[in-house]
Each structure stands twice: as C-alpha cells, then as structure tokens.
Image (cartoon, grey):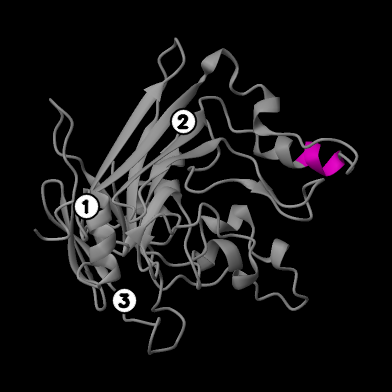
Amino acid sequence: MNQNDNLDAESQRLREEVRREKNWKRWGPYLAERQWGTVREDYSKDGSSWDYLTHDQARSRAYRWGEDGLLGMCDRQGRLCFALALWNGVDPILKERLFGLSSNEGNHGEDVKECYFYLDSTPTHSYMKALYKYPQSEFPYTRLVEENRHRGQDLGEFELIDTGIFEENRYFDIFAEYAKAASNDILIKITVANRSSQAATLHLLPTIWFKNTWSWGRTGESYWSKPCIEYKKDGELLLSQETLGKFRFVVEPLPNIDAPTFLFTENETNAAKLFGAENPSPYVKDAFHEYIVNARKDAVNPEMVGTKAAPH
C-alpha cells in the first residue's frame, strides 16, 4: 500500500509542497491590507515614514516594494494581485484598502480603524475565507482621525464601532472565499449580504492587477518588463507576465445577467494629481476611483488593455 493512501487531501498537498512536486503555496493571503505609511515606501529627507505616503495618496501612487488590497491574495512575490474594491454610493473614495491611523495620529500609536475578520485558511491556502463589514453610511474618515488625535494616552481608543455607523445593522457583510482546484487554478467566490432591513446600493469591483516593476529605471530581478492584462472575450481576460507566464481570469455572470463589462487602467502613479507633473499615460492607478465615484468615463482605457482590470 502506498504511504500516501492514508493521507487526507490537505496532508497530501503539504507533502507535495515539501517535495517540490507541486507549488501549492505559490498563491496565498500574502497581500497586505495596508501598505501606505510604511518604512519601505519612505523617501522623505527626514525619515518621516509615517507621513511620507499617506492613505489619501495611496489610491493614486504606485508602490515600489509591495501592494495592498481588501480581502485579497497574491503570489509569493506579489507580482499578480487580486482584491476587492467597494463603493456604497456616499463615501468620498473607493474603498480599496484598510483605513487606519499613523503612529503620529493615534493616541496609542498606529491603529487600523476597520472591522474585518480572517475566518479560515488551510496550511497550503487551498481554502481561505475572510469577512469585511462595510458601512452603508459615509465612512467617518475625518472623525476617526480628529477624535483619536485629541485623546491622550490615558484614554481608550476611538474605534469605528464607537461612531455608531453600524447602528440598525446599516452595513454589508462581504465574504471572500478562495479554493484551489490545482496549484495555479483558483476559484474565487464573493458573497454580499445586506444586514439592513432597507435596500442599499453597493458597487463591487473584484480587481486584478500587476505590481509595478517597470517604472523605476532599472532592470534585473524584481524589475521585470511591463506585463499585460487584455480583454479576450465575454467575461475572460488574458494575463501575461514574463516570470509568471500566462493566466486566464474568468468572471462567471450571475443568473439572468449579461456578461460583465471590464474597466482597464495602468498601475501607474497619477503624477499630475500628486506632483503637478505630466503623466506618462492618461490611465493611472486611481482610474477606478475616478470612474466610479466621480463618474469620469474617460479615466479608463477604452482599448480594454492595461496592468489593472476589474469587472463592473
């Protein structure tokens, strides 16, 4: 009898991973929920890493050393990333990453001000599940900053739940589940539940993008040439990157609903907005924010090609 016959499925996957027979851990929950305000993205003259790249800049500025996203996943090297983007129709920004206070803003230091939960994951990440609670009222970004800034260290932290934004269950529960049929074959299921007794609108953009490795004037390892995401046919994209190879991203339409349309842009810094400089491309990192929140239809690439894409 083969010694593998008594192994359960996950133990078998672990053995294949250890023996380098299959790369089961290539994809996992390695994508940070927040990358902004970190030492790795600090190019300030005085070393003020907490203030150099702010949450407000994060949606418009390409990261050099990492990426971030909501309930997302990526490969071990963070080359290809997937995460959720959300808009409740009233927030001033598209929700693409967790919001929090920097070390200088919180009365107890750095602190994320969100409600999210990691619910499950196998050792090889063959199955993962997470939950994010998204308020239906306008997210209290300013109030969270101001209230915590005014509190001393002798007082407790002012949390999102303290704002009353979840009263009368006026929020969405958003579940993201990942299941691997093979080491490079991943099913993603997104479930949205309106916990309020009233109807509410939610814009959901499951977003896939490549880390920017091409805009830094360097070549070699970790500075690969520009990859590509292109539209192929109804509900299907082709993704190409020189070290990952080619992948298909397929979106299954909901019952009685046509195949989704896709938005495309580049994972490039919006230099015109942040620095008053010329953008190398008119399609930049914050294009989906501009398209959804500010109704700028010209923000996305009509040629349906880029390094960042999402069905909508």
Q: Secondary structure at mark 1?
A: loop
Q: Are marks 3 and 1 in contact (CB under 8 Å)?
A: no
Depth check: give the residue in front, 266 or 73: 73
The residue under the point 58% across, 29% down is 138
In the rendered image, which residue does mark 3 sit on? 226
* Quadrant housing residue 160: top right
Cα separation, mark 3 vs mark 1, equals 42 Å
The residue under the point 88% across, 44% down is 153
Q: Nearer the viewer, mark 3 or mark 1?
A: 1
* Quadrant housing residue 249: bottom left
Q: Label 2 sits on what residue type?
A: Asn
Quadrant of the drawing holding the N terminus: bottom left
Q: Earlier in the sequence, mark 2 or mark 3?
A: 2
Mark 2, residues whose alpha carbon is within 10 Å: few (<14), some, or many (≥20)? many
* Image position of 94 (left or right of 177): right
In the rendered image, which residue does mark 1 sit on? 7
Q: Label 3 sits on what residue type?
A: Lys
Q: Earlier in the sequence, mark 2 or mark 1?
A: 1
Depth check: give the residue in front, 270 or 83: 83
Q: Which residues are magenta?
A: 146-150
Mark 3, residues whose alpha carbon is within 10 Å: few (<14), some, or many (≥20)? some
Mark 1, residues whose alpha carbon is within 10 Å: few (<14), some, or many (≥20)? few
Q: Nearer the viewer, mark 2 or mark 1?
A: 1
Q: Secondary structure at mark 3?
A: loop
* Residue 77 percent across, percent down from the top left: 39, 71
> Can you name the residue that lies furthest to the top here?
197
Q: Are marks 2 and 1 in contact (CB under 8 Å)?
A: no
Q: Main secondary structure of the magenta part?
A: helix
In the rendered image, which residue does mark 2 sit on? 88
Cα separation, mark 2 vs mark 1, equals 46 Å
